Structure formats: structure tokens, C-alpha cells
Image (tube, grey):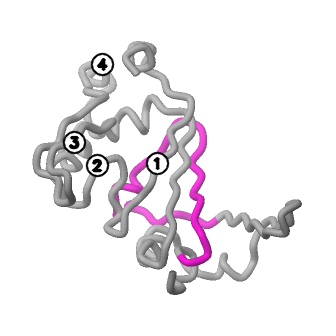
Amino acid sequence: MKEVLQQQQLDLAVLGFGPDGHTCSLFPGHPLIALEEDKSSSSSSDKKSRRWVESIIDSPKPPPRRITLSLSFLNEQTRHIILCGAGASKQPILNDVFEGKKFLDNPAVVVDDDNNKTFQSYHPKMVSPPPYPCSMVVPTESLTWIVDTNAMHGEKE
């Protein structure tokens, strides 16, 4: 990890998101998010002084002490991010993060693989401003959300 951070570029980060919308130990309403929002309004000359790794000692979810990549690093120094979520508890987050639900009726791509499973690809628009830390993640090249049917439709697990 030290070598990656010295290069200050990460090709891919695979992250999860919680039922409260947190990702990477970045929790909604936590002072670390407010600090990141203040940094994003800083001038480009301040970017060199930004921290790529942050510590948190008062996580609202156990364990209380954590280390995380900063939102600045995820947004400025990560090329691609995949956000993964499973379970009905994630459905309210998806409702709040994406505009409307009509995209559920018209998948962009449906593919059957050799295991007789169906994969659907949607291209919804995200709401602005982003309501949760997981929706504040904007990598330099691409962001992909991978969720199961329960998360998409709120069905019981």
C-alpha cells in the first residue's frame, strides 16, 4: 500500500456501502466528511497537502478505531471504483442516491451466462447533491454499482 500511495494513483478500489450510506469508514454526518467537504472547496495548490489516509477514533459502528482512505484520495487519485451492496437494507440508500425508479423497468442490457443467471445493467442518474458518503465517491474514470435483487427492489433476504 505504501508504494501505491507514493505513486498517488490507484487503478481500482472495490468498496461496500452500509445501510446508512457509509463507505470506507466515511459515515454520514461524521466530522471527517465535513472536513473532506471543506477540502474539496480548497484551491488546487492545497491538493498536495491533502491526506490520503485518515484515522477515525469515534466510528458510529464498531470498531470505533479505524483507518480509511480519504474521500479526496478516492475522488482524485482512484481511476475506477466498484461499489457493492447486497440485501434489502440497502434499498432505501439506492432510492435516495438515484433519480426516479423508472430505470428499473428498462434494463440497458440483459445477459444470460452459462450458469443460467441473468445480469441486468442500468444507467440511472445520481441525485445532486449527493446525500450519503457512498454517493460522494466520484473517481477519475468510472464508478460502477453492483447490487443484488434484494437491494434493488427491497425484497426480504
Q: CA distance from mark 1 to mark 2?
A: 10 Å
Does the stretch in magenta take in 130? yes
Does the stretch in magenta take in 143? yes
The local crowd at label 2, few if under 14, some if 14 to 19, many if 20 or more residues have their Cα within 10 Å, is: many
Whichever of callouts 3 and 1 sits on the residue coming sooner in the sequence is 1
Return the residue found at the far front.
115
Q: Is residue 136 above or below residue 147?
A: above
Q: Which residue is mark 1?
A: 15
Whichever of callouts 1 and 2 sits on the residue coming sooner in the sequence is 1
Q: Nearer the viewer, mark 2 or mark 3?
A: 3
Disc 1 is placed on an element classified as: strand
Part of the protein shown in magenta: 124-150
Give the residue at x 31% y 28%: 52
Q: Which residue is mark 3?
A: 66
- Kind of residue indicated by mark 1: Leu
For the residues labelled 1 and 2, say whether their Cβ atoms are less than 8 Å apart: no
- Kind of residue indicated by mark 3: Arg
Q: x and y percent of residue 10 in the render?
A: 50, 27
Q: Which residue is mark 2?
A: 25
Q: Which mark is residue 46?
A: none
Question: In screen coordinates, is 38 left or right of 3?
Answer: left
Disc 4 is placed on an element classified as: helix
- Kind of residue indicated by mark 2: Ser
Q: Which residue is mark 4?
A: 48
**Camera-side residue: 145 or 100?**
145
For the residues labelled 2 and 3, say whether their Cβ atoms are less than 8 Å apart: yes
Give the residue at x 31% y 24%: 47
Question: In screen coordinates, is 64 left or right of 48?
Answer: left
